[in-house]
Image (cartoon, rainbow, N blue to C red):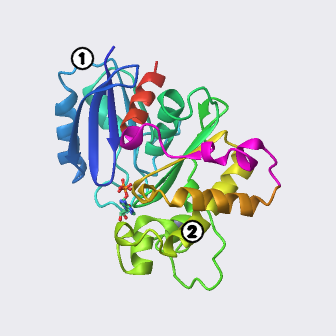
Amino acid sequence: MLLGAIEAGGTKFICAVGNQKGEILEKKSFPTTTPKETMEEVIEFFYDKKIEAMGVGSFGPIDLDKNSKTYGCITTTPKPYWSNYNILEELKKHFDFPINLDTDVNGAALGEATWGSAVGLDSVIYLTVGTGIGGGVYSGGKLVHGMTHPETGHILVRRAVGDKYKGKCLYHGDCLEGMASGPAIEERWGIKGYELPKAHSAWELEAYYLAQGLVNYILIISPKKIIMGGGVMKQEQLFPLIRGEVVKLLNGYVSHKNILGNIEEYIVSPKLGDNAGICGALALALESF
Ligand code: ADP
Ligand code: ZN
């Protein structure tokens, strides 16, 4: 059975054909320009592919309430031209197989639970730290949707002592994304994250903020695994720093072997690597049956 997958990002749309084993058989990227231009290319790519279902993991926020008039719309993005664009409706005009839309990070969480580092677990959080910070939440064997969908990147964090940086979030300034996204690192230090030395104090500060996010997710959702991906997490020295901060901030309160004994296997990178997003969309396609 062939499945279609779209990882709809603010920079590019990755389109792929894959199967129920999570294998990607064909893949092509298109730049994210205007909805008209980008979607024309996406639709043309899938036209003759003989797929039976499609999953779309999209940047957002998106309206996922099936009873809403704007179900399927990208809502408040600062990305020019894409605000209030209904991506699902456009795809449905062209294809009559089932199409399952969710956030890119919810898709990635599902993909990791289906084929990646959280196979067999019914509760997992996937956090991406890149241009923005976003998290997918899979809990009780289901992707979490509520009033809208979780926005784990915009939670409020406690400032590090002496940190005067104003923050980069357009909406909140110094929320987690505002303090720890890739662009926040660049603005704070005046140099891109990947140009900073691995021993720079920037990474301790970065770990301090990201760990606060993780601690809140642990306390609210109690996930069985936390997977951290995205460009910034290519800095592998962050992992031990984050794990250490999580233990310190929890201070023995969540007394579980995952935290106290085995945290190297609890806070991990995506096993699907750079394919976490597109395999996530593939998992969304599979879920549509
Ligand atoms: P996006 O979030 O746009 O999908 P990425 O996850 O690659 O894409 O995130 C891009 C951000 O991550 C940029 O701010 C970039 O500077 C930062 N980044 C990318 N690679 C690295 C790296 N190896 N180390 C630190 N920061 C990185
Ligand atoms: Zn914010």
Residue highlighted by disc 1: 50
In the picture, which quadrant includes the N terminus? top left
Residue 198 x %, y %: 44, 68
Q: What segment carries the magenta color?
A: 253-277
Disc 2 secondary structure class: loop
Residue 8 x %, y %: 33, 44
The amino acid type found where label 2 is placed reads Cys
Neighbor class of circle 1 (other Cα within 10 Å; few <14, some 14-19, many 20+) is few
Residue 206 within the magenta-colored segment of the rendering: no
Q: For the point 46% across and 38% down, which residue is it?
A: 271
Question: Is residue 140 rendered to the left or right of residue 81?
Answer: right
Residue projecting furthest to the top: 1
Residue highlighted by disc 2: 175
Disc 1 secondary structure class: loop
Q: Is residue 101 above or below residue 200?
A: above
Distance from mark 2 CB to nearest ligand 2 atom below 8 Å: yes
